[in-house]
């Protein structure tokens, strides 16, 4: 007897990743018509949500997956099962909450990167846009300092506030250019 195991993977061009509470679902709700659950506590998203970013000549499907935590690639938290879903995306949008201090924020970024790197080479090599989220909760100096920290590691960052809409148009342009 032959046993076949079929795996269903969501088809999205872009995956939103980050620690729990980073603002992934809020971003999805801001740039698509999806209505994911949003709340001020971790692990609000328990299943991936898909949204369609409608452009004049293209539509881009975006997947918002549950937050990742340290150990996710080995099955901790909810992230593990959903890392598979972002394996086929062209681009990752990695959200980090800028209202946290620079050290904690950089540790958050590295935690998620480590999980991607451990999970598979295809995730490790995927294009990534780093987004500092919730800029309305941080002051200008804090944001500048964090930008400098990332540039010191040769990493470019974008800044957004889903609350005020700041930076969303630029992010949409970058997603459009890099998800082809
Ligand atoms: N002030 C402010 N709050 C935000 C912003 N974006 C998200 N939030 C808040 O941050 C909290 C978490 O947002 P979610 O979108 O649920 O975060 P998530 O990354 O999807 O979280 P999980 O599903 O748990 O992984 C909510 O209370 C949001 O209202 C923002 O730009 N500004
Ligand atoms: Mg969520």
Image (cartoon, helix red, strand yellow):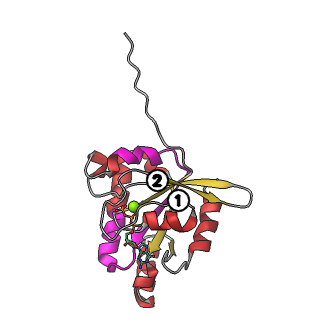
Residue 2: give x, y in percent of width and height: 39, 13
Residue picked out by circle 1: 34
Label 2 residue near ligand 2, CB within 8 Å: yes
Image coords of residue 15 (percent x, y): 49, 55
Magenta span contains residue 94 = yes
The spot of residue 68 in percent (x, y) is 33, 57
How many residues crowd mark 2 within 10 Å: few (<14), some (14–19), many (20+)? some
Q: Quadrant of the N terminus?
A: top left
Q: In the rendered image, which quarter is residue 141 located in?
A: bottom left
Question: Dot 1 lies on which element?
Answer: loop
Residue 125, given in percent of the width and then of the height, sits at: 48, 51
The answer to the question of whether label 2 and label 1 lie on touching residues, with beta carbons closer than 8 A, is yes
Residue located farthest toward the right when viewing the structure as drawn: 57
Mark 1 neighbour class, 10 Å CA radius: few under 14, some 14 to 19, many 20 or more: some
Q: Residue at x 61, y 67 (%)?
A: 172
Q: CA distance from mark 2 to mark 1?
A: 8 Å
Q: Quadrant of residue 67?
A: bottom left
Q: Is residue 13 left or right of residue 55?
A: left
Note whether residue 150 is visible: yes
Query: What residue span does the magenta drawing correspond to?
Result: 81-110
Q: Is residue 17 above or below residue 22?
A: above
- Picture residue at 43% right of the left edge, 28% below the top: 6
Residue 62 placement, left or right of 94? right
Give the mark count: 2
Vertical comparison of 130 with 141: above or below:
above
Q: Residue at the spot x=57%, y=62% of the render?
A: 32
Read off the residue under disc 2. Answer: 49
Residue 122: tell me if it is visible: no
Q: Earlier in the sequence, mark 2 or mark 1?
A: 1
Give the secondary structure at mark 2.
strand
């Amino acid at each position: 007897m032959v046993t076949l195991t079929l795996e269903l993977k969501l088809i999205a061009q872009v995956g939103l990743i980050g620690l729990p509470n980073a603002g992934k679902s809020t971003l999805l709700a801001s740039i698509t018509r999806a209505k994911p659950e949003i709340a001020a506590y971790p692990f609000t998203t328990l299943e991936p949500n898909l949204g369609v970013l409608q452009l004049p000549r293209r539509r881009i499907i975006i997947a918002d997956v549950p937050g990742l935590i340290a150990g996710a690639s080995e099955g901790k938290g909810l992230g593990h099962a959903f890392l598979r879903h972002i394996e086929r995306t062209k681009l990752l949008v990695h959200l980090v909450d800028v209202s946290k201090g620079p050290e904690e924020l950089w540790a958050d970024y590295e935690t998620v990167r480590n999980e991607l790197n451990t999970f598979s080479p295809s995730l490790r090599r995927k294009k990534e846009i780093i987004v500092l989220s919730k800029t309305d909760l941080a002051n200008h100096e804090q944001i500048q300092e964090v930008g400098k920290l990332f540039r010191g590691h040769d990493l470019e960052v974008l800044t957004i506030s889903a609350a005020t809409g700041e930076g969303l148009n630029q992010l949409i342009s970058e997603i459009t250019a890099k998800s082809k």
